Amino acid sequence: MANIVILGTQWGDEGKGKIVDVVADRFDIVARSQGGHNAGHTVWVGDQKYILTLIPSGILHEKLTAIIGNGVVIEPGHLVREIETLRGIGVNIGSNLMISDRAHVIFPYHRMMERATEAKAGKVAIGTTSRGIGPTYEDKIARRGFRMADLLDREAFEPKFRALAKEKNCIAEALGIHEPWDIDEIYAEYCGYADVLRPYVTDTATYLAQQLAAGKTALFEGAQGTLLDIDHGTYPFVTSSNATAGGVCTGLGVPPTRIDAIFGVTKAYVTRVGSGAFPTEEHGPAGDVLRDNGHEFGTVTGRPRRCGWFDAPLMRYSSAVNGFDSMVVTKLDVMDHLDTIRVCVAYERDGERMESIPSLAHELESIIPVYEELPGWRSDTKGLRRYEELPDKARAYLDYLQEQSGVEVGAISTGPERDEIIFRKGTKLAAMLPA
Ligand code: IMP
């Protein structure tokens, strides 16, 4: 058995939560390396809908240990509520959950700073999830953040917290963005969270190293997607962490040599929430069909997602950065009744053909996709479980995605349920994740 990574290939919401849930029972550990409660993973088990934002979705499987790594930023109140909600619907959470002592903590001033900067006149809003994610990573990089370990060490925490909180209030006031909040109240509230979370907090990197050395296997689950990565994404319209393969190593303390395979998840089309360039966005009726059929509304913020066509140059880029061994195509059934389907195969800018995306945001805004049109299959694929059952035109579409992006299609998700998935025989993915 191998240790694998599952990542989003585009702007998040590719359906990673379901794929992780489907394969998780083959592993001993499931671990999350970055992001915070800006992520929302929806998993359906029968009629029960689970939305997980901080806890890895593998927790839904009894025998697994779920790890929240050092690269994640944690809003402790949110985590406490997520634990309670999951328990309330019968999910066992105890020693099977581990939280890194080095994970950074989100405070109310982070959210306040974010709201203020997003609303600032003259600044292009990123369209963030307003969860304080960016400002928390800012404090981490500036070496003034608080980690879970600090929160637990009350004696040392109190004076440092009070000093920093005062400083934050001064900055806010100087910028004219002060939203009053009570330092004593927040201190007491966070001490309460620390008491609840204390049993779960530990040195997860050492734990992982020991477990992997002993032959246990791990599934590393990404949040957001490659094009939201702080380094490789469509900057500045990105999140503030590394959502690409390298982020798994730094965000968990896992050596690259421990990773055996990397699988990318993509929808059969593309979506994006928030601002920023989206070359293949479809503003016509087909975009509405994708949004309505695919229920494309944000899990965390409820915002309608922008919808568009599969972008092969983006997938080539995503694969170059992550080294995908295989891709999982989700929500194929959402496209079942389209007459024609477009696939972007290259871009054009000022009359010149381009094979990859530019780094500058305004250049990315101005590129024009070059499309190939394929006929739709116009029949139901929902719930199909064998590749041979797919209509010829749906298989031709998948072959085309594979050919254009240079990444094999290893599995296809045909609905939200655990068993609505096709593992394609003879692929690397099927070989590593035997049914
Ligand atoms: P932040 O992560 O809240 O700072 O938001 C930065 C950008 O990332 C915004 O465009 C968000 O909509 C986007 N984003 C953050 N998390 C997710 C996610 O889980 N799915 C999709 N988009 C996300």
Image (cartoon, rainbow, N blue to C red):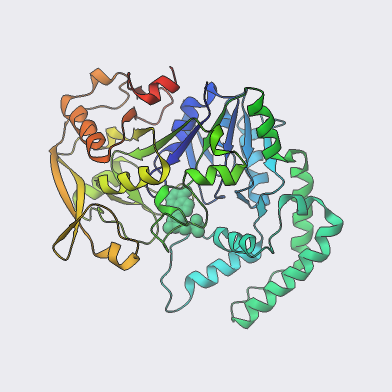
Considering only vertical position in the picture, is 105 above or below 292? below
Q: Quadrant of residue 393?
A: top left
In-image side of 313 versus 89 (left or right): left
Q: Is residue 302 visible?
A: no
Count of picture labels: 0
Residue 386 at x, y = what percent? 30, 18
Please identify the quadrant where the C terminus is shown: top left
In-image side of 112 versus 378 (left or right): right
Q: Residue at coordinates 38% horizontally, 58% vertically from top-left? A: 234
Q: Residue at coordinates 31% horizontally, 44% vertically from top-left? A: 315
Residue 9 at x, y = what percent? 38, 43
Q: Is residue 143 visible?
A: yes
Considering only vertical position in the picture, is 353 above or below 264? below
Depth order, front residue of 108/218? 218
In-image side of 322 versus 355 (left or right): right
Residue farthest toward the right in the current orientation of the protein: 155
Residue farthest toward the front in the current orientation of the protein: 257
Depth order, front residue of 161/53? 161
Q: Residue at coordinates 42% horizontally, 48% vertically from top-left? A: 226
Considering only vertical position in the picture, is 61 above or below 69? above
Depth order, front residue of 53/148? 148
Residue 353 at x, y = what percent? 17, 56
Residue 39 at x, y = what percent? 50, 47
In-image side of 90 versus 367 (left or right): right
Depth order, front residue of 216/393? 216
Q: Residue at coordinates 53% horizontally, 46% vertically from top-left? A: 247
Considering only vertical position in the picture, is 419 above or below 333? above
